[in-house]
Amino acid sequence: MADEMMKWPEWPEYSEHTQKRIEEVFQSNRWAISGYWTGEESMERKFAQAFADFNGVPYCVPTTSGSMALMLALEALGIGEGDEVIVPSLTWIATATAVLNVNALPVFVDVEEDTFCIDPRLIEAAITPRTRAIIPVHLFGSMANMDEINRIARKYGLFVVEDCAQSHGSLWNHQRAGTLGDIGAFSCQQGKVLTAGEGGVIITKDRRLFELLQQLRADSRVYCADSTQLIYGDMQLIAKGDIQGSNFCLSEFQSAILLDQLQELDAKNHIRETNAMYLNRELSKIDGIHVMKRPLQVNKQTYYGYVFRFDPHKFNQMNADQFSEMLRQKLHMGTFYLHPPYLPVHKNPLFCPWTKKRYPESVRKTEEYWRSLHMPVAEQASEQSIVIHHAILLVDPSQLSRIVNAVAEVANESCLMK
Ligand SMILES: Cc1ncc(COP(=O)(O)O)c(C=O)c1O
């Protein structure tokens, strides 16, 4: 069959049972947790319980996005103006803007060449008396070195907020991503392995943080302690007011989708991981291609993106834009599915804090300040590697050889171009 005729998997995947869950919400008369008690527990609470159980933690607070999950995590930890938070230089901008959005300063640290996660060897040099927290990001398919990060955090009395936007279900030393630090923050935006189109989730083992997080996302309200006392039409959220909140509540429709999709997460993660291992084996046979390292502590790897690096001198000095364009043409894939990694945050045009008057000058800084930062590994990563979206890892294994063949063809053709 011609390649054009072979379709790659769609993302997100849709099923009849998801639709049934959504219809349940339609008919329930409760479309938001700020709606009234109907005699049934809210979808949001059912999902929160299921996600807490999935991760083996007592507490979970869903929210509107991964960006808000990170921001509320920092607020719950009391981080704000005058504070600094260490973040990796290679990540989606939201990791850094979450810090800015609490008026604190993001301090970038370069990443490891073979995982693209924050390089723990560089963290201590970035710590100052103002540093309050580290946000490791488990990026694409890798996990940050949580043993080292936690060791440093303990030494300096820092909080750790794991950015798990891309890592729902990974295991580090048999513990889920998001349970290794003080708070874990997840995204459920369309591209993610667990998605409701938009959405976010926060998990923690700490009851006090849980109480603050609940209020931060629901206008300083919490669920009432005993819903058996409620009658139809009562409000289930009650005033608390320990901390200034705002409305960042996930809707009942989104919670219903997540509750449904969570059932399949481990099984899909397993398929992606198996197929990623096949790609690792086969792609590493091609001269000039390097696959990512899997540290021994990783027992389960969630792939948001499958990444490989290439040596430009073996590929006629191509950059990642040119390489990915060639691959997309050969595989008939759109840019959602195959692309270079992000630009490092300090070089990303989407990162422009100096344009926002609301930020204090001490964190807003100037364009020159941010753009002149230099993070060599992150900068090289964005020029010399390729990311393939996780949906592609759900194909029948027989189709994966097409990707390997396409990379081999690019290698051969770029030799001929020399
Ligand atoms: C690493 C990382 N952090 C945070 C976010 C923010 O999540 P959201 O888009 O749900 O706000 C994303 C989303 O792309 C992400 O990839």
Image (cartoon, grey):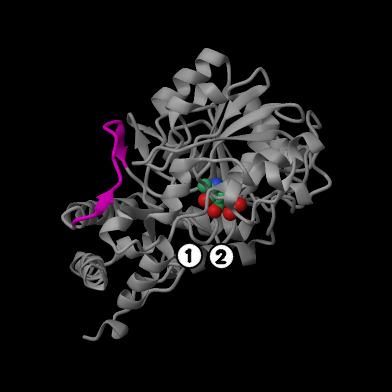
Residue 42 % position (x, y)? 62, 50
Instruction: Determine which quarter of the picture holds residue 45.
Output: top right
Amino acid type, residue under disc 1 in the picture: Thr
* Furthest residue in direction front, as rendered: 418
Residue shown at the point (31%, 41%) measured from the top left:
300
Residue hosting label 2:
22
Q: Is residue 291 magenta?
A: yes
Circle 2 crowding by C-alpha within 10 Å: few under 14, some 14–19, many from 20:
many
Residue shown at the point (49%, 40%) measured from the top left:
137
Tell whether circle 1 marks a residue whose Cβ is less than 8 angstroms from ligand 1. no
Left or right: 368 in relation to 123: right
The Cα–Cα distance between marks 1 and 2, rounded to whole angstroms, is: 6 Å
Work out which quarter of the rendered image holds the N terminus and state it. Answer: bottom left
Magenta part of the chain: 287-300
Task: Answer yes or no: is residue 29 visible.
Answer: yes
Residue hosting label 1:
18
Left or right: 63 in relation to 170: right
Instruction: Determine which quarter of the picture holds residue 271.
Output: bottom left
Residue shown at the point (29%, 80%) measured from the top left:
6
Circle 1 crowding by C-alpha within 10 Å: few under 14, some 14–19, many from 20:
some
Nearest the viewer among 71 and 15 is 71
Task: Answer yes or no: is residue 228 visible.
Answer: no
* Furthest residue in direction top, as rendered: 155
Amino acid type, residue under disc 2 in the picture: Ile
Q: Is residue 146 magenta?
A: no
Answer yes or no: do the residues labelled 1 and 2 have beta carbons within 8 Å? yes
Name the secondary structure under disc 2.
helix
